[in-house]
Amino acid sequence: MKYVQHSSRILLLFSILTITFVATQEVVLEDQFLTLDKFLHFGCFIYLTIIAFLSKIFYQELWVYVIVLGYGILIEIVQIYIPYRSFEFFDIFADFAGILIASFFIKFAKIYI
């Protein structure tokens, strides 16, 4: 279990760095990409929540969800100050939905695995 915890912490660090880098890059948006963007937010936050949970950085499960959502909100706030990016509430909603689904996966895994 220590191997999983240690590996998850390294993976979490690289994931946060990668997502932060991508979230601050200029993107040319087309209409069909707008829907895909929300699915990307959704999927990334499922992934981040599960990796953060496995890393066992936070002792209480609730803090995993709060910190990951706070990270999503922080990314959106930073994007206000980047000329080619913008703040979107729907991105935060997609992040929250991903965290919620991840929490169900985690609960299911704790019960059945």
Image (spheres, rainbow, N blue to C red):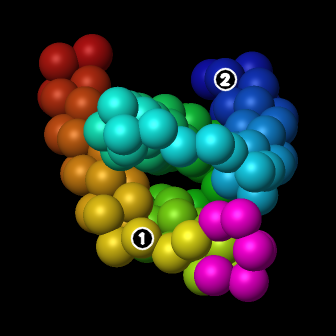
- Residue at 73% x, 83% y is 81
Q: Residue at x 52, y 65 (%)?
A: 72
Q: In this orientation, which residue lies closer to the viewer: 96 or 105? A: 96
- Say whether marks 2 and 1 touch (CB < 8 Å): no
Q: Name the residue beneath numbered marker 1.
A: 88
Magenta-drawn stretch contains 84 = yes
For disc 2, the neighbor class at 10 Å (few under 14, some 14 to 19, many from 20) is few
Quadrant occupied by the N terminus? top right
For the residues labelled 2 and 1, the Cα–Cα distance comes to: 34 Å
Measuring 68% from the left and 53% from the top, which residue is drawn there?
A: 23
Kind of residue sitting beneath label 1? Glu
Q: Is residue 77 left or right of residue 91?
A: right
Q: Position of residue 10 (x, y in %)?
A: 82, 35
Q: Amino acid at mark 2?
A: Val
Please tell me whether mark 2 or mark 1 is closer to you in this view: 1
Magenta range is 80-85
- Residue 43 picture quarter: top left
Q: 53 or 1, which lies in front? A: 53
Q: How many marks?
A: 2
